[in-house]
Amino acid sequence: MKIVRAYKFRLYPNEEQKQFFEQNFGNVRFIYNKMLHDKIEYYKKTKKMLYNTPAQYKEEFEFLKLSDSLALTNAQLDLQEAYSKFFRKASGFPKFKAKHRSKNSYKTNNQKGTIYINGKYIRLPKIGLVEIRMERQLPEGSTINNVTISRTRTNKYFAAVNFEYEKKVEKVKPETYLGLDFSMSDFYVDSEGNKGNYPKFFRKSQEKLAKEQRKLSRMVKGSNNYNKQRTKVAKVHEKIANQRKDFLHKTSRKKANSYDVICVEDLNMKAMAQTFKFGKSVNDTGWGMFVHMLEYKLEEMGKQIVFADKFFPSTKQCSSCGNKKNEMPLSERTYECESCGLEIDRDLNAALNLKQYAVKSIQENLVSSDVTI
């Protein structure tokens, strides 16, 4: 089985390398905006699509020749993808990249060994060896596809190394099942009655964040003090994000190691945050990131994740007798079944229903596979 993964490592470039990175960030942003602008103007005049490439601009803008050519090519591909999503109505019309709001990054590809890792250094096209901190090694036999260089708002440089490798994965015969129901207050409640106990990192740091943001609001925009304070605000956000990722990785690993099949609901978290006006609480949990982590960790171990259909009534249905209620408002925290008399926490009831959904789904798949054979 071919597995594609990406590891993110901290870089420690020297001053010359930092200048090269910054030049690439700016040039990638420039070529993206220039190509987008020309496409728009050409369409206004001709009502046709302009198929332009970065190479067409290098004579006019010679500073582009100093950049990694693959970085410019990837900017072109990103613009094409943005247009493709727009035509598929998957997103809005492509937007121009702003210098102070857009992410500072560029992607370069490995062509015949132009990118490799040697000890505590990574070799990158047109710049050579850059010091890298490797917390973990790439799996044996890995092939590097591409690397994305980025700089955070706290002025730290990172390399996201995308690689692929072959791994023999044996399918695990399902024996242990778990249902996970999303909970606004506890992160999740599982079918065994355990709760996620999410530490609510954003809520805990909200007072400190507000204090730093108040200081920032009083400063003159663009001044040295403003830039220093903006970095302090960014550090608070960065710490929250790192704490959240650490918690989600550890929790998803524990669940993936303990169960063969895990069932979750196919939730639209963005719509949930807007509908119920719980934006902070929903977004703070990082549930979508957690589900993604569970999915690939289970896959690598030959295990399975099952997504319950959006219309599956996990909250309204009794986990004991299967009776279904017409309504189950958020204010009702206990599920009381009118048919069998069951009284149970609504989240635990939903988790038990999800576990039953997973068992039924796996059994039906096994039966259909036998019939096909």
Image (tube, rainbow, N blue to C red):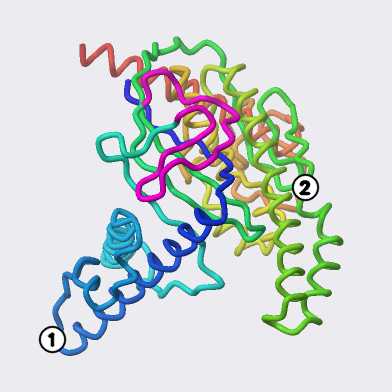
Pointer 2 residue: 200
| Of residues 23 and 215, the one drawn nearer to the viewer in this rendering | 23
Residue pictured at 36% horizontal, 19% vertical: 141
Image coordinates for residue 144, horizontal then vertical, percent: 36, 33
Could you tell me the amino acid type at mark 1? Thr
Could you tell me the amino acid type at mark 2? Lys
Vertical relation: 81 (above or below) 303: below
Q: Residue furthest bottom?
A: 45
Residue pictured at 81% horizontal, 82% vertical: 218
Q: Residues within 10 Å of mark 2 (few under 14, many from 20)?
A: some
Left or right: where does residue 291 sit relative to residue 165? right
Sequence-first tag of 1 and 2: 1
Pointer 1 residue: 46
Vertical relation: 321 (above or below) 121: above
Q: CA distance from mark 1 to mark 2?
A: 53 Å
Q: Residues within 10 Å of mark 1 (few under 14, many from 20)?
A: few
Residue 236 among those drawn in magenta: no
Vertical relation: 86 (above or below) 126: below
| Of residues 100 and 346, the one drawn nearer to the viewer in this rendering | 100
In this figure, what is the number of numbered marks? 2
Residue pictured at 55% horizontal, 58% vertical: 270
> Which stretch appears magenta?
118-142
Q: Which mark is residue 216?
A: none
Image coordinates for residue 212, horizontal then vertical, percent: 82, 67
Mark 1 lies on a secondary structure that is: helix
| Of residues 136 and 284, the one drawn nearer to the viewer in this rendering | 136
Residue 127 among those drawn in magenta: yes
Left or right: where does residue 250 sit relative to residue 73? right
